[in-house]
Image (spheres, helix red, strand yellow):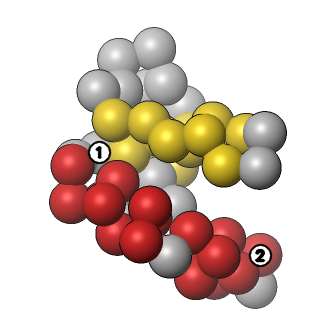
Amino acid sequence: MTVDPVCGMSINPEKAEWTADYQGQTYYFCAANCLAAFEADPERYLAAKDSQ
């Protein structure tokens, strides 16, 4: 399992419909709106993840 960087939901990467590649890493999302939010400002969500 991995975590959606936008909403924090647990995602099974093998079944994820929505993905994005950013700086050589693949991120997985629970829904299209989380993917869209990430694509609009990926650094916002990665910075939040790093501060946890």
Q: In terms of depth relative to the viewer, which is nearer, 1 or 46?
A: 46
Residue 27, horizontal then vertical, whole percent = 56, 43
Q: Residue at x 35, y 17 (%)?
A: 15
Judging from the image, what secondary structure is the residue with disc 1 in?
loop
Q: CA distance from mark 2 to mark 1?
A: 20 Å
Crowd around label 2: few <14 · some 14–19 · many ≥20 (10 Å): few
Above or below residue 33? Residue 12 is above
The amino acid type of the residue labelled 2 equals Asp
Q: Is residue 8 visible?
A: no
Q: Is residue 26 visible?
A: yes
Q: Quadrant of residue 50?
A: bottom right
| Figure quadrant of residue 48 | bottom right
Q: Is residue 47 left or right of residue 44?
A: right
Q: Residue at x 30, y 60 (%)?
A: 36
Which numbered circle lies on residue 14? none
In the rendered image, the vertical position of residue 1 relative to residue 41, given as above or below: above
Q: Please report the residue visible at 22 percent of the width from the left and 47 percent of the height from the top.
A: 31
Residue that protrudes farthest toward the top in the picture: 14
Whether the residues at callouts 2 and 1 have beta carbons within 8 Å, the answer is: no
Question: Where residue 45 sits: x, y (%)?
Answer: 56, 74
Q: Helix, strand or loop at disc 2?
A: helix
- Mark 2, residue position: 50
Check disc 1 and give the amino acid type: Cys
Nearest the eye: 19 or 49: 19
Compared to 49, does 48 lie above or below?
Answer: below
Spot occupied by residue 9 in the image (x, y as percentages of width and height) = 38, 54
| Category of crowding for the residue at label 1, using alpha-carbon neighbours closer than 10 angstroms: few (below 14), some (14–19), many (at least 20) | many
Question: Which residue position holds label 1?
Answer: 30
Q: Quadrant of residue 42?
A: bottom right
Residue at the location (33% across, 35% down)?
A: 18
Task: Residue 43: give x, y in percent of width and height.
Answer: 65, 76
